[in-house]
Image (cartoon, grey):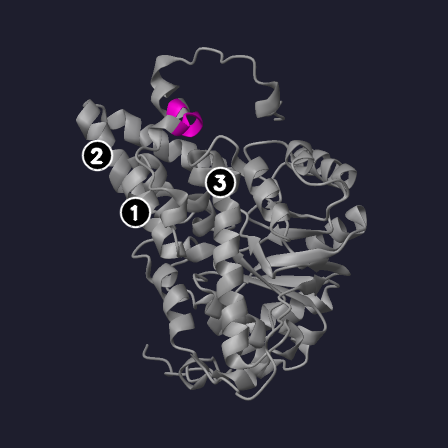
Amino acid sequence: MSYFGLTKLIGRIPVLAPAQNEAKSLENPKLIKNLPPLESIISLQDFEDAARSCLNERSWVYVSGASNDCYTASKNTEMYQSVFLRPRVCRPISQVDTSTAILGHRFQVPIFNAPASLAMLTHPSAEVGLAKGLSASGSTIIVPTLASYSLGEVAEGLPQNHPFFFQLYIPRDPSALAKLLEEIRRASPVAVMVTVDLPVFSKREANERYEMRMAKEKGNSKDNKQKKKQSRAASAAISPDVTWTQIQTIKEKLGIPIFIKGIQCAEDAMKAFESGCEGIYISNHGGRGVDTSQPALLTLAEINIKYPTLLSKMSVFIDGGIRRGTDVFKAICLGAHGVCLGRPFFYALMYGEDGVRHLMNILRDELENAMQLCGTQCLSEAHPGFLNTKALVSMVDTGEVLNMGSKL
């Protein structure tokens, strides 16, 4: 489905009553109430606090939620806190360069959005607002397959010839895949990031509890069952049987660099390289995949230990738990070229494009400050020696197989 975009909006078609409330929650920014002044936001936690109190409940539950007990989601952030910095002193740091180079394109900051659907839950500009805010901040957007606007419309929000990335869910239907690949070819992204870490829809208890409560208040238990069917139907449209051979076929058809999004162990990172992929995107879907999967930063450390030279041969993105400029610096020290944030950009988008710019300014300032206090002038100087990773390394899988023997 394609969209005409906000600039071409001349009116709204009346919606059937059952869907009316949901449509309003997606499209009416007035339902985001009592936003604090943007200038009062000085950290990403402030954005989250504002979202918690200002978003309507349905939007908050979707954006903030994760799988089962949300263990992986919380550990994503905690893992960064377990890594300590080892600053160096007596180094010239009056000028610092936060830029990063990816596939021949230089971005002024190594900070990008983690592609996620339903950005319109927090602002009607959705991915168009994200694209404008990110590009104005020296970065770019990773356009999601399930965007609120067409790929072409999101690209229109970028300056002419500005590079961008596209995240691809592989459809189950071959004809739908062929049509999508043709759209991607016409748009000419820098690279395509193929998501592989969510072959089936995970259990989202916060969403289920919300829908059950809403159904109970309406006195309609069938409504909750219908919501579950809709979620399963959305998941069923995505292929659960993606193979490395299919990845190679898509790469051949597109003729542009391919990243594997959803790398959660070192072995798959190496497999991506051996399959001809130009990059990897380390992610556990923000804790929305299988709960208790290892935190993303731990996966990055595991790749460092098992395949020390691999990260220098590929472009590396990572998301999950990044909330401070120091987190960005730590990921870069461990070999990432770009870091991505999901929920924080949704929260910032409550303020539209200005909120996205404000978030980027906060992170850029924090990153510059971390670099200066650690004694680095540019990100190419960042390396693991700036980190105390003892706690992190102690959790890295050694490859030893636990063999308890047969108890039968």
Judge from the rendering whether residue 171 lies leftward or rightward of residue 217; answer left or right. right
**Numbered disc 3: secondary structure:** helix
* Amino acid type of the residue that numbered disc 3 sits on in the rendered structure: Ser
Image height of 148 relative to 381, above or below? above
Q: Tell me which numbered mark, 1 or 3, is placed earlier along the sequence.
A: 1
Asked whether the viewer can see residue 368, the reply is yes
Kind of residue at disc 1: Glu
Give the main secondary structure of the magenta stretch: helix
* Residue 14 percent across, percent down from the top left: 44, 10
Circles 1 and 3, Cβ within 8 Å, touching? The answer is: no
Residue 242 in percent (x, y) is at 61, 52
Read off the magenta span. Answer: 24-29
Q: Which residue is mark 1?
A: 205
Examine the image and state in which quarter residue 34 appears. top left
Of the pair 253 and 296, the residue shown nearer to us: 296
> In the figure, 343 relative to 212: above or below?
below
Residue assigned mark 2: 213
Q: Is residue 35 magenta?
A: no
Q: Give left or right: position of 13 versus 8.
A: left
Q: Amino acid at mark 2?
A: Arg
Question: In percent of the image, x 78 and y 37: which residue is there?
Answer: 186
What residue does disc 3 label?
Answer: 235
Tell me where residue 284 appears, x and y as whole percent. 48, 59
Q: Secondary structure at mark 1?
A: helix
